[in-house]
Image (cartoon, rainbow, N blue to C red):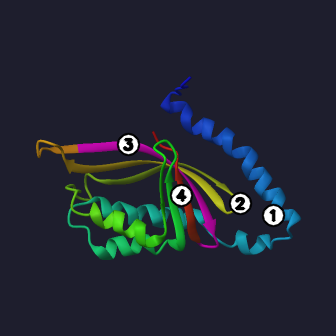
């Protein structure tokens, strides 16, 4: 049986799903005597905002390898990306780079009509849930410009100030 949720409820559902694991994660950290002040000094909101800004620059025509390298600089070397719905998992920064490079010529928009807009964010212990709108232009099968606009939800795990893993929970 397949259950469908309205888009308006998806982020609320994610909030409920995250409450228990985030609470468990925080309790585990207390039991392991992890120095929370070090974790508390990391500004995850700033990292996420800078990451989304850097990622937006790769969604436009004439984005460069430097733009891709800037995005990759947010990841730790063993970074992994998983799209939960489609069962796709990419592990290692080199494979992620190869994927980004393979799409660099696909994007046809500019910064005035392409980008990323953050809508919601929840911070946890070394993790965050982020909802954002991603907009870009590509050529369709008939070589006509097509606007893609989609809501994305990422669950991001951090290792210090680097992104360890992103689980893409989007449709």
Which residue carries the number 3 mark?
150
Foreground: 92 or 41? 92
Would you call the spot at circle 3 few (<14 residues within 10 Å), some (14-19), or many (20 or more)? some
Residue mark closest to the camera, 2 vs 4: 4
Rendered residue at 68%/39% (across/down): 16
Please tell me whether the stretch drawn in magenta is mainly helix, strand or loop. strand
Q: Is residue 60 left or right of residue 28?
A: left
- Determine contact: label 2, label 1, CB under 8 Å: yes
Residue 70 is drawn in which quadrant?
A: bottom left
Numbered disc 2: secondary structure: loop
Foreground: 40 or 152? 152
Which residue carries the number 1 mark?
29
Q: CA distance from mark 1 to mark 3?
A: 35 Å
Quarter in which the N terminus is drawn: top right
Q: CA distance from mark 2 to mark 1?
A: 8 Å
| 150 drawn magenta | yes
Q: CA distance from mark 3 to mark 2?
A: 28 Å
Numbered disc 1: secondary structure: helix
Quarter in which the C terminus is drawn: top left
Q: Earlier in the sequence, mark 1 or mark 3?
A: 1
Q: Is residue 138 left or right of residue 122?
A: left
Which residue carries the number 4 mark?
166
Q: Earlier in the sequence, mark 2 or mark 1?
A: 1
Rendered residue at 62%/66% (across/down): 158
Numbered disc 3: secondary structure: strand
Rendered residue at 56%/61% (across/down): 165
């Amino acid at each position: 049986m397949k259950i469908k949720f309205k888009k308006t409820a998806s982020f609320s559902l994610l909030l409920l799903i995250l409450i228990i694991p985030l609470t468990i994660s925080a309790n585990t950290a207390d039991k392991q005597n992890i120095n929370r002040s070090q974790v508390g000094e990391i500004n995850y909101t700033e990292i996420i905002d800078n990451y989304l800004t850097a990622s937006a620059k790769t969604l436009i025509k004439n984005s460069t390898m430097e733009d891709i390298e800037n995005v990759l600089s947010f990841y730790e070397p063993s970074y992994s990306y998983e799209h939960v719905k489609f069962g796709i998992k990419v592990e290692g920064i080199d494979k992620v780079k190869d994927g980004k490079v393979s799409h660099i010529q696909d994007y046809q928009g500019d910064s005035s009509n392409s980008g990323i807009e953050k809508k919601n964010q929840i911070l946890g212990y070394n993790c965050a849930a982020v909802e954002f709108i991603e907009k870009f232009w590509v050529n369709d099968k008939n070589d006509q410009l097509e606007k893609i606009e989609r809501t994305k939800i990422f669950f991001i795990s951090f290792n210090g100030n680097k992104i360890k893993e992103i689980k893409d929970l989007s449709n």
